[in-house]
Image: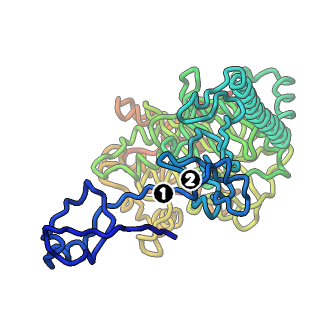
Amino acid sequence: MLSGNISDLQNNTANIPRCSQAFFANKDSFTFSRDKLLHDVYRKQFSQDGYLMTLDWAIGNETCEEAMGKKETYACKENSYCYNSTNGSGYRCNCSQGYNGNPYVGCKDINECEDPKANPCVKKCTNKPGNFSCACPHGQYGDGRKNGSGCMPNEEDTAFPLAVALGVGLSLLFIIIGSLWLYWVSNKRKLIKMKAKFFQKNGGLFLRQQILSQGSNAIFKIFNIEELEKATNNFNESQILGRGGYGTVYKGVLPSQEVVAIKKSKFVDESQIEQFVNEIIILSQINHRNVVRLLGCCLEIQVPLLVYEFISNETLFHHIHGQSHSFLMPWEVRLRIAAEVAGALAYLHSAASVPIIHRDIKSTNILLDENYTAKVSDFGASRSVPFDQTHITTLVQGTLGYLDPEYFYTSQLTEKSDVYSFGVVLAELLTRKTPVSFARSEDQRNLATFFTLMFDEQHLFQLIEPQTLEEAGMEQLFVVAQLARRCLNLKREERPTMKEVAMELEGLRRFHKQQLAPQNLEETEHLLGGIGPSSGYITEKASTQHSLEVDMVPSMDLPR
C-alpha cells in the first residue's frame, strides 16, 4: 500500500482557486507550465502519454538486521536476500544468485543447462539448486566452461584407444585375409580332388600305365586342363574351328607356339572307358602322312579333351562344295586326294597295329593342308577290331548320306562300311554334288542312290561338269566312277577292300601322269587294265580284269 501527503499549494499572484490536480513526475521529464494545466490539449496528452516517474522506496524504517529478527513481518522470502535502503531508512529484497522471480513471494531456481545459448559449459552441464557445474568427458581435461579453459584431449588417454582401434583393425584384416586364404586353399584342394577323380574315372591311370609299359609314345602327352584353357583363351567362341556330331573343335596355341586342334567331346560312355583309353593308345601310335596325328589328351575334366595336329586349309567339303562354281579343283588334285584317303583307310584297316574302322568317313572329315594333302580326321566314332573278328556289333553311328545301308539294318560294323562311305566321297569328287540335298528332286536327293542309278543306266556323264571331262577324259572318269559304283554296292561282300581301292587309284594316278606325258600304248593299256582310248563303257568282265591287274601295281603311299 502506497501512501503519501501532498501539502496545499496557493499562488497568490495567479489569483486562482485552490489546486485541484496533483501527480507524481520526474522533475527532469516534466517542466511545469500553467498552460499545461489549463488547456485541454496538454491535459489530453498527459492522460495518454503520461510522464516518467521514479520511485525510491523501502520497507519500513528498520534495517535488515532488525527486520530479520521479526520473522512475522520479515518481507524477504526463500531464495532471496535483504539489503538496506541507500536513501533513507528501511530495507528491500532481491533474489539470490542462481534464482529469479519475486523475492517477496519466493524465488525459483534458474536451470542454466536447459538453454543451449545460455549453457555456460562446453561438454557436460549439471544443474544444481541456485548453481551449476561443468565437467569434461573421459579422456579430456579442463574446467569445462566456455569462458574458461574448456575441455582438451588427454594425450595419455587418446593413445590407448588409438592403439586398441589399430589392434582391432589389424586383427580383422588378418582374419579376413586368413579366411580368404583358407577359402582359396579349400577350393584348390577340392579342384585337385575333382581333377584326380575325373582323371581316374576317364582311365588316366590306365593310360599312363599303358604308355609307360609300351615306351613307344614319346610324342604323346597327357595335358593338364590349365594348359589347354590358356591355349584356347578359355575355350573362347572365336577359337572354334567347327562343330560336329561328337563335339566341338577349337584352335589352340601351346606354350611352344605349336598350333593344335583341341576336340571337346559332348559325352563319353563311362561303361566303355577302358576301350576308350585303348583306342586313344592305338590312335596315338598311328603314324601315317594322310592321318591327322593325335598329339595328346586331357582327362582332368568330366568329358576328355583330345589334342590333334592343326591342319590349316579347311575341309574337302569346303573346297568341292563351299567354293564358288567359278573355281574348280583340278582333276589331278582330286584324284590325288582320293588316292591319299584310300591309302590312309587301307592303312587303318590292315597295316595298323590293331585294325581300326573309322565309321564316319565323309568330306568334312577330310582336311587339307596348304599343299592340298589329304588328312583323315575325327576318330570320335572309330572302333578297333580284334584280329580274330570280321565284324563287331555296335549301336549305329554315322552321317546321313554316307551311312552303309547294310550296317544301318544289321548293326554289324565291318571294314566294308568305310568302303561304302568312301564310295560316296568318290561320287562327290566326280560330280561336285552334296551327299544329300533336299533342294533336289526326290529321286536325286540321295547322291549314292542317284549316282548308282545314273551309272547303271549309262547316263553317268550327265552328272559330270564339262571342265572335269576335258581334264580327265571319259575313259579315266569312267574307271573312277566304276570304282565308286563298286564301293556303293548294297551287299558288302561285293565291295572291294580299301587296299584294293587304294591300289587302283594309285594306278590311275600313274596313268594320268602318263597322259600328261604320253607313253607307248602298251603301258597305257596295262595301267588301265586293257582299256584303249576308243573304249566305251567297260563290261563287267573287263572291269574284273582291270581290278586284278591294278592290284599288281604297288602303292607308293601305302605303309608297310
| Residue lying at 46% horizontally and 70% vertically, measured from the top left | 438
User: Circle 2 is placed at which residue position?
Assistant: 90
Cα gap from disc 2 to disc 1, whole angstroms: 8 Å
Q: Position of residue 486 (x, y in %)?
A: 58, 55
**Badge 2 or badge 1: first in the primary sequence:** 1
| Residue lying at 44% horizontally and 35% vertically, measured from the top left | 372
Along the line of sight, the residue nearer the viewer: 361 or 85: 85
The residue most toward the front is: 12
Vertical relation: 59 (above or below) 318 = below
Q: Position of residue 307 (x, y in %)?
A: 64, 35
Image quarter of residue 161:
top right
Image quarter of residue 342:
top right
Residue type at mark 1 is: Trp
Along the line of sight, the residue nearer the viewer: 22 or 371: 22
| Residue lying at 86% horizontally and 34% vertically, measured from the top left | 206
Please give the label number shown on residue 57: 1
Vertical relation: 298 (above or below) 378 = above
Along the line of sight, the residue nearer the viewer: 510 or 70: 70
Q: Secondary structure at mark 1?
A: loop
Asked if residue 189 lies left or right of residue 20, the reply is right
Asked if the residue at tag 1 contacts the one at tag 2, i.e. Cβ–Cβ closer than 8 Å, the answer is yes
